[in-house]
Image (cartoon, coloured by chain):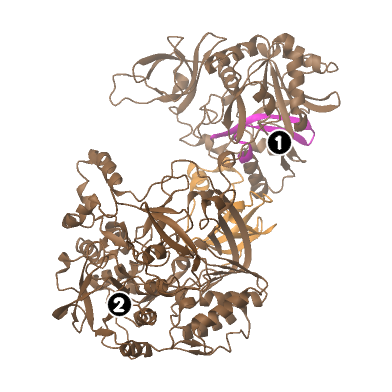
Amino acid sequence: MTKNLRVKSSEYIDETNRISFKFNNKTYHGFKGDTLASALLANDVHLVGRSFKYHRPRGIMTSGSEEPNAIVQVNPGTNRTEPNVRATEVEIYEGLEASSQNCWPSVEFDIGGINNFLSPFFPAGFYYKTFMWPASFWEKYEFFIRHSAGLGKSPTSNDPDIYDHRNIHCDVLVVGAGISGILAAKNAAKNNFKTLLVDEKNELGGSTIFENNEFNKIDNKTPSEWLKKEIEELKNIENLEIKTRTSVAAYHQYNYLLARENLTDHLEAKDKTNKIRQRLLKIRAKKVILATGALERPLIFNNNDRPGIMLSSAIKKYSEFYGVACGSKNVFFTNNDSAYESAMSLYNKGINVEAIIDIREQSESKIVKKVKEAGIKIYWSHSVVDTTGYKRLNSISIMKLSNDGTSVTGGKISISCDCLGVAGGWTPAVHLYTQSGSKLKFDEEKKVFLPNQNTSEQISVGSCSGDFKIDEIIKNLNQKLKDTFNINETDLDSIKVEIDQENSKRNIWLLPSDKPIGKTKPFVDYQNDATAKDIKLALREGFRSIEHVKRYTTTGMGTDQGKLGNMHALGIIADTAGVKMGELGTTTFRPPYTPLTFGTIVGRNVGKFFDIFRRTPMNDWHIENKAEFENVGQWKRAWYYPINGETMHQAVQRESKAARESAGILDASTLGKIDIQGSDASEFLNRVYTNAWSKLAIGKCRYGLMLNEDGMVYDDGVTTRLGENHYIMTTTTGGAANVLGKLEDYLQTEWPELDVYLTSVTDHYATASLCGPNSKKILEKIIPDLDLSDENFPHMSFKEVNIGSIQCRIMRISFTGEQSYEINVQASYGKDLWKKCIDAGQEFNITPYGTETMHLLRAEKGFIIVGQDTDGTMTPIDLQMDWIVSKKKYDFIGKRSLYRSDTMREDRKQLVGLLTDDPNIVLEEGAQIVSDLNQSPVEMLGHVTSSYFSPNLKKSIALAVVRGGKDMMGKKLFVPMENKNINVTVANPVFYDEKNERLNA
Amino acid sequence: MFLINCPYCGERDQQEFKAGGEAHIERPKQPTELSDDEWAEYLFMRKNIKGVQFERWNHAHGCRKWFNMVRDTSNDEIKAIYKMGEKPPSQ
């Protein structure tokens, strides 16, 4: 039998809409408007989880995003499951299922609970201290530790939901829709600022919306009544957008904020489909108004963590807002007047309040008098020293506090109760404020950290700026709005506020017990089970920095990020170490304020949109012809074209042979192409390439090597002179964007006097590269008018011709060592060109080949691939390409570095060819090379950079970089592998057609 | 995430820009005249100041223009932005 603890109908709860849901496999009922927490409390369920380390039973503690205990797994076992969700933030809907985390086999009976009794053996730093030895065992320890810890389970199948991103630019962003936020937003919008108001809750109004202390009045109404009227007025204001269920996760510099707008989490499964679940709002605001409110602090006393012990403000919210009584015998424990408001709230609804324990000596406010009149017993100058009840609080013991507050005296009084509301004062929620880079200052009187130095256009208003009383809030808010918007009047000027004054304050960070601290469990961080005792131990062990104490004790490191207990941790450290809190500083609050799910962060960038890719105009043909693809930069390039079930090796061998024996065709559209124009174009090329360009005739092509200023090879490619002041440069596929960026950099910043213009035309042209002894015959068929004789169209030259009506640029250049023609046409004709080549080549068995065959063919010729045979540490000299480095040119990028003592060392790694003694063994790329197998430790001379079985040479060939390799020609070296040592001989890297006879064959 | 006022395009989000390191390091006009140490000073040595620093930035995903920025690296406050070739503002 479950009890129903509904006390009255609330306007926020729709009692006509009954909802059933399951918690830990048991069915319960709640109403539309309930959170999982309020619905469970209405069913008298307090025990909802177990703590992380000691597996102590824990109950719902708060009513908001600061909840440390009620952390649940939502919809377990489904593809929508989500771990570590705060029950206080889950709005219930029909069919919702949730379960406790961190307990096994169940929350009622948890085997890990044994840790609680073993707790003397689990001090702060237990894991660090215990699992250190032997070091090699850590992996085994880790497995068990992670297994027994476990904060929920991540989903194992694909997320069915859609997530979205939206950019928002506004004049004013107001974070938090409590009384301050609402008034700020209203005045901003009324003054013609485009305003966005966001709040994490589903209803506007913050805590003022259920504030009905009869001694606080705004314009003669209770704050609650008055605010409802204000909210009603918001609807008619232009320039104001309001987003509820929207929590700001991060506040970055320059007023850039990320917020999660929750759109479907409160809906039934059937209403979730095909809707955006959450939207990440990327907000850039001219001004930010933080009205994030304050979080109530607990009090730190022995056994302060039992189910049934809650924040006083939460008890009030459950009763006023959700119409739920959290207990039938309620006691409050406080250091300020707010617990009296909670007590009166319960009393007025006929809920029993047994007593109030107040650590102060007295308080004269009207609400306290009212409580006295109601006959509720008040114990002044008393403190709770212990509590009992394993799965639910059943009694507390209290004793008289000494005058200095460090000990308790007299007899112990036991009070039976099932709910204890604790009220330790208020902590401004300054998390977002500090995330923005702004600085806090400690206020000794209020015992809070307050906004001090803003780094961007922002203000903090209301209780997050330390104004806790409505009169202070309105007065200061009014002034701040006038200053910020530069206005003379607001509609706050005429508001009349009456409040109940609170004059008595007493703050004790760690309340004393009759037992020595070592025998008590005063929890500071509930989720991570860090107690005041652990903090004191850390200090005894020599930790002083707050950041170190935090990590050692794990205080504030749970999913709640220490929202409740951090201030107490600081206070206890300050008291124990005898320093001022202001000097101690705080730990860093990092984004996100509340956890974000990965789906929200990635938005639409999932599946094929995860990373963009580029396809060439010939792509469809490659797909139709069953090409396998590889990623090169962002490009999808045809890798090889297997036929009849060929393996990659078989396909590549066939393609490579065909390209040398008859004809091959490669899609080279991905090569970077930069159009260079201007009267200084030749001078520019002279400065960026290592070789000379001034004398290149119009219509001729030249290979160029580009260095970084440090002398290392950066990129290579062929550049063609199209006209007097016009060149087209090709770059490597992956390097295109960077090369353009680098060239622009030099042009704009070092040589602005040069008249040169660069344009990327990579995507504008499609390129088919015809290669092989029959390539000329094929081209002849396609363009009969063109004189292809070696005299008219020699190697390294260029022609601009038409194929039919299509204009094309043909370069006779070769990356394979065979006669070859690169035909460039406007991209939209690329596929057409390709098909023409294939058709014309049929009689010559034209063979399309992919990047793998291209790599093999060029390796046979010893041509490097920048990025494969070089790695940013190779100079042209290291590559044995001295021939391309001009001795005559006075300067070019990287020239001076080629004469640095280090780049001139003889024992640098240099590019060589390697031949295996057994021609059938193909070396692994990346394999290490040594000269002496008996050396220990063996000296690594270098590694294999490219390696293939050459079908044309019928043997294995490899390129490698070897220390001092230039002078090792013919030397025997070894490539040690796991099972064998491979004998190799250093060789000339040009394996095939050393005299380049085939280029003109 | 900075909001950067490109001198050619106006205010844009930082993700459109690329940082290009310390500003006002001029490439030597006659590199061959320099000793190894002098060349290394140009090539490798950068100040990496905590505080006000002069930097190069490029509107890489916009107008692709390079410009200079004065930024306080301790709090990321952008103090000034000016075009290449213009004199840096006096502090």
Task: Spot the residue most to the front.
Answer: A1
Along the line of sight, which residue is nearer the eye, A489 or A598? A598
**Location of residue A546 by image quarter:** bottom left
Q: Is residue A269 magenta?
A: no
Residue marked by disc 2: A332
Which chain: orange? B
Q: Where residue A505 is drawn, which disc sits there?
A: none
Residue marked by disc 1: A763
For image coordinates 28% across by 48% down, the residue present is A105
**Relative side of A896 to A445, left or right:** right
Of all chains, the one bearing label 2 is: A
For image coordinates 65% across by 25% down, the residue present is A623
Q: How many labels does the image show?
A: 2
Q: Would you call the spot at circle 1 few (<14 residues within 10 Å), some (14-19), or many (20 or more)? A: some
Which chain: brown? A
Along the line of sight, which residue is nearer the eye, A208 or A516? A208
Which three-letter amino acid code belongs to the residue tagged 2? Phe
